[in-house]
Image (cartoon, rainbow, N blue to C red):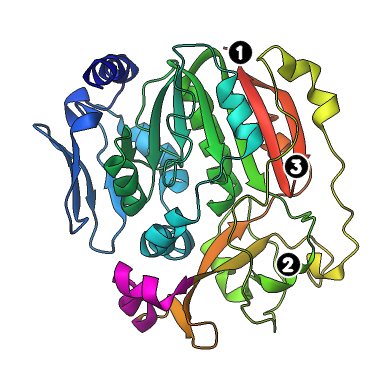
Amino acid sequence: MFFHSLKACRYVHRFWGTSSLSLDSFCTFSCLSISSSMKEIKVKDAFSLCTLLPDGEPCIQQSVSATEDNRCSSISVKSTPEIEKKYVHRVYDAIAPHFSSTRFAKWPKVAAFLESLPTGSLLLDAGCGNGKYLGLNSSCYFIGCDISPTLIKICADKGHEVLVADAVNLPYRTNFGDAAISIAVLHHLSTENRRKKAIEELVRVVKKGGLVLITVWAVEQEDKSLLTKWTPLAEKYVEEWIGPGSPRVRGPSSSTLESIPETEENGLCGHRKESRESLTENMQQSACSPPQNEDDSLFSKDGRNQQEYFVPWHLPYHRAEVSGASAGALANGLAKKDDKKGAVVYNRYYHVFGEGELERLVSGMDNAVIVDKFYDKSNWCIILEKTL
């Protein structure tokens, strides 16, 4: 165990070696300790890695060497919209223990991708959640990050090499990792620019020839009844978005929050890829035709596709008491009680992707190409290869 830790630390050191973020600010992952109050995440014998702002949002420390121009040019993309803070970050912090207990099955295609990596590969799982994919391939080295300190604590308690980080501002060295994955993450970002930036960050951190697997929920759901159980975003949230990617919404829905299957495995099962070389060969074979949008519930009143939803998460009362965060959530309106189901109901923000949308986000990138794309069990998925 100690031997493997030393090897992993050597990889981590090289991964951060020339990063604009100080290596001293991170030091050794295996020494990660997270305070019980979750007010601060620290590395043993090192400076503070991440602190939480008064509103509970993690704030990753930035390099003092970053130029003012760079900060100004990217502030609109890197600044987290309130809708994400409230309906993604705070929700997952509140439901983390229960969420983690339901996330254990590995998606076959993700597992196949990880198992196809060469021995000794260094992989980043950006948005690792409870860390279910970390360490899946024992011949590779894994690093994970997530925006939720609570989920990161769960990962750290399992001994994984993890830290709190934002998907649109990854604190890792450029051109080093052999591969990266982003599983069911981008659909929680509320603007097109932020979704595109997150993809650019994934490509940035891998070296030339490195692979990036991205999966997102599709608006073309195989089980169309799910859409009736999701709440289309009301017009009052339109002002949360500015610029490209503004939500296409209809009027307030009369639908009520209902229970939905709380299984993230509504995606990614099917054929396995045996090797990296098979990615290009199977590109056309793996592409599947999504179900046709015959249900009017998919469209807004002006005929445009409805893609912004609140998807409920039902936290059982007995789990809510354990987490301790639900009382405040109920008081400030972040959650509501459902006595009939015996649960506290949280809304999670989703931008579900339409056919071709994921490919369009990467169409303007000059340093990566799509080597595989497919629709699988209500998810759109792509695999990128870095070319420069």
What's under tag 1, amino acid-wise? Answer: Thr
Relative vertical location of residue 154 with respect to residue 26 in this rendering, above or below: below
Relative vertical location of residue 7 with respect to residue 364 in this rendering, above or below: above
Q: Is residue 81 visible?
A: no
Q: Quadrant of the N terminus?
A: top left
Under circle 2, the secondary element is: helix
Under circle 1, the secondary element is: loop
**Sequence-first tag of 2 and 1:** 2
Q: Position of residue 274 (x, y in %)?
A: 69, 18
What's under tag 2, amino acid-wise? Answer: Leu
Relative vertical location of residue 41 with respect to residue 324 in this rendering, above or below: above
Which numbered tag is attached to residue 242? none
Give the residue at mark 3.
Answer: 376
Mark 1 is surrounded, within 10 Å at the Cα level, by few (under 14), some (14 to 19) or many (20 or more) other residues, namely: some
The nearer-to-camera label among 2 and 3 is: 3
Which numbered tag is attached to residue 387? 1
Image point 32% across, 32% down: which residue?
A: 161
Mark 3 is surrounded, within 10 Å at the Cα level, by few (under 14), some (14 to 19) or many (20 or more) other residues, namely: many
Highlighted range, magenta: 315-331
As rendered, which of 327 and 5 lies closer to the eye?
Answer: 5
CA gap between label 1 and label 3 equals 26 Å
CA gap between label 2 and label 1 equals 38 Å
**Sequence-first tag of 1 and 3:** 3
What's under tag 3, amino acid-wise? Answer: Asp
CA gap between label 2 and label 3 equals 18 Å
Image point 48% across, 31% down: which residue?
A: 201
Under circle 3, the secondary element is: strand
Q: Is residue 169 left or right of residue 103?
A: left
